[in-house]
Amino acid sequence: MSTKELLVTAPFGWKIINGKEVPDKNEQQVIDIVRGYRALDGFSYKNIALQLTKPHYTKGRLLGKFTEYEAKIINDAETIEERRKRE
């Protein structure tokens, strides 16, 4: 019988190190940027995706241009402070 490894991925804003979720500094910054754009009047997820693509933000595990869906996922991602409150 062979053993199979379970591929574990962390949510956006986090990474797995030694089996534990730890904050990903770059992705946490992108969460803050997206939320800042959302706070501005008239910034839709589509506009945010366009803004993120322009300055060549690195998406780490995401490839290509940012999409509206990705902007929403990033906006909804958990920040370090939100996780601390939850724990």
Image (cartoon, grey):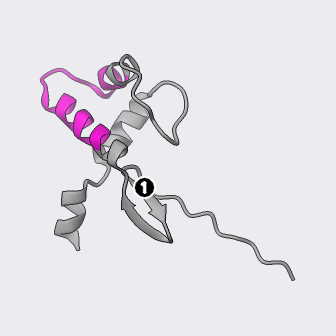
Please state the extent of the stretch shown in magenta in the rendering: 29-49
Reply yes or no: does residue 46 show up in magenta. yes
Is residue 14 depicted above or below 6 in this figure? above
Horizontal relation, residue 85 to residue 17: left or right: left
Reply yes or no: does residue 30 show up in magenta. yes
x and y, in percent, of residue 14 in the image: 39, 55
Taken as a whole, is the magenta stretch helix, strand or loop?
Answer: helix
x and y, in percent, of residue 6 in the image: 65, 69
The residue under the point 12% across, 23% down is: 41
Is residue 33 depicted above or below 56 in this figure? below
Where is residue 50, by image quadrant?
A: top left
The residue under the point 22% across, 23% down is: 43
x and y, in percent, of residue 26 in the image: 35, 42
Say what amino acid the circle numbered 1 marks: Pro
Which quadrant, please, contains the N terminus?
bottom right
SS for dot 1: loop
The residue under the point 32% across, 50% down is: 77
Name the residue furthest bottom.
1
Badge 1 is on which residue? Answer: 11
Where is residue 86, by image quadrant?
A: bottom left
Is residue 23 depicted above or below 61 in this figure? below
x and y, in percent, of residue 80 in the image: 24, 58
Is residue 71 depicted above or below 76 in this figure? above
| Crowd class of label 1 (few under 14; some 14 to 19; many from 20; radius 10 Å) | some
Name the residue furthest top.
54
Horizontal relation, residue 31 to residue 57: left or right: left
The residue under the point 50% across, 71% down is: 19
